[in-house]
Amino acid sequence: MSQRYCLTLDLKDDAALIAEYEKYHEAIWPEIHDSITAKGITNMEIFRFDTRMFMIMEVDDTFSFERSAAMDAANPKAKEWEDLMWGYQSPVKNAPEGVKWVLMDKVFSL
């Protein structure tokens, strides 16, 4: 059974950095693609408005945020990617310390 999560973060307010960030996402590293799918993420889309980012993740029954974090911690390439991306990203207001992508609450469904 599939589940969907929506997350948000901000990018640094710098047009050149935003362009670089988007360039990286035109062709993510193969190891990152493999890392994402190995976690049970079956679909991921990221949207941007100005500096605000919005991610939709669809996951299978094997996915959990705890398992995802543990897999990233054990994967040097994932750590390299996350460290690189952090140079472009800024936490949203009220994000917990050290948290990048913040899980959003659903407030409406049609």
Image (cartoon, rainbow, N blue to C red):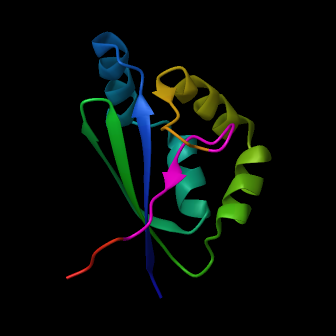
Percent coordinates x, y for residue 100 in the rendering: 57, 40
The percent coordinates of residue 32 (x first, y second) are: 55, 44
Q: Nearer the viewer, residue 7 or 42?
A: 7
Up/down of 109 relative to 80, above or below:
below
Q: Nearer the viewer, residue 82 or 75?
A: 82
Q: Is residue 104 above or below residue 91?
A: below
Identity of the residue furthest to the front in this view: 94
Pinpoint residue 35: horizontal percent, then vertical percent: 60, 52
Magenta highlight: main SS: loop
User: Of all residues shown, which one is farthest toward the bottom?
Assistant: 1
Left or right side of 11 for 62: right
* Residue for point 68% across, 37% down: 98
x and y percentages locating residue 24 in the rendered image: 40, 28
Identity of the residue drawn at 56% across and 69% down: 40
Magenta part of the chain: 96-106
79 horizontally vs 58: left or right = right
Residue 39's image quarter? bottom right
Which image quarter holds the C terminus? bottom left
* Residue 83 in which image quadrant: top right
Depicted 91 relative to depicted 46: above or below: above
- Of residues 94 and 87, the one nearer the viewer is 94
Give the total number of marks visible in the rendering.
0
Q: Is residue 40 magenta?
A: no
Residue 98 counted in the magenta span: yes
